[in-house]
Amino acid sequence: MKQASLPVLAAFSVCASAHAQDFTKFSVPFAVSKSAQLLTGETWRDGGHLFRLYGVQSCLRGTSAEEPNGNKIDCGNTSLAHLAALFDSAAVTCQPIGYALDKAVFVVCGAQLNGETIDVGTALIATGYAFAATTAEGKAVNENYLVAEINAKMKRTGLWGTTFQHPVQLLLNKRWERQQ
């Protein structure tokens, strides 16, 4: 086995240490502040940091959904409005679990509603205003979220009562086009 040089090991050690120290400040649960800036139906900025719900994909802003009466709505803004309503009506606590490629902190969150704790991702997906995120290969990141999505689709809950382009499929198509 070939051994790495001392400078390479030292550089790796410094980078790993810096990344570990950076994540340490996000290794404990934290409350989402009421002043958080919501960016999408699954991403927000709070205290200068970017956070994203792990395993959740909201509708893309600027895409449309058509209601049965023919009225067109912005699908992404609808997802965003439902995240905002949940954050506004409940105390939300999140647990950091890692980093996204864009350095957003991936989190799983619970909301206190009527004395019960609910998973924020499940709540958004089960009500039809978000979807189960997938890997680049199209496999669900969280199988429980996929079950919630299938149930919402079968019941035509939320956005499933409209006609829209599924955001996961849109993202997978864009990735495929970039690879061609």
Image (spheres, rainbow, N blue to C red):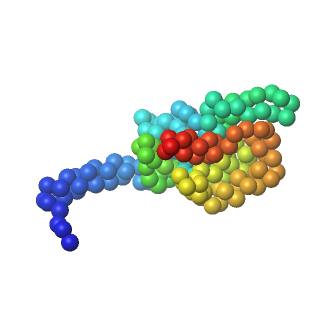
Question: Which residue sits furthest bottom?
Answer: 1
Taking the spot 62% from the left edge, 41% from the top edge, the residue there is: 170
Taking the spot 44% from the left edge, 53% from the top edge, the residue there is: 98
Q: Is residue 161 left or right of residue 118?
A: right
The percent position of residue 19, horizontal first and vertical second, equals: 32, 50
Q: Is residue 27 left or right of residue 68?
A: left
Location of the N terminus (image quadrant) = bottom left
In front: 21, or 136? 136
Res 8 quadrant in image: bottom left
The percent position of residue 20, horizontal first and vertical second, equals: 32, 54
In front: 91, or 157? 157
User: Is residue 146 in view from this perspective?
Assistant: yes
Question: Which residue sits furthest left?
Answer: 6
The percent position of residue 160, horizontal first and vertical second, equals: 77, 44
Q: Is residue 34 above or below residue 117?
A: above
Taking the spot 22% from the left edge, 56% from the top edge, the residue there is: 13
Question: Which residue sits furthest top?
Answer: 71
User: Is residue 91 in view from this perspective?
Assistant: no
Q: Is residue 155 left or right of residue 42?
A: right
In front: 84, or 141? 141
Res 61 quadrant in image: top right
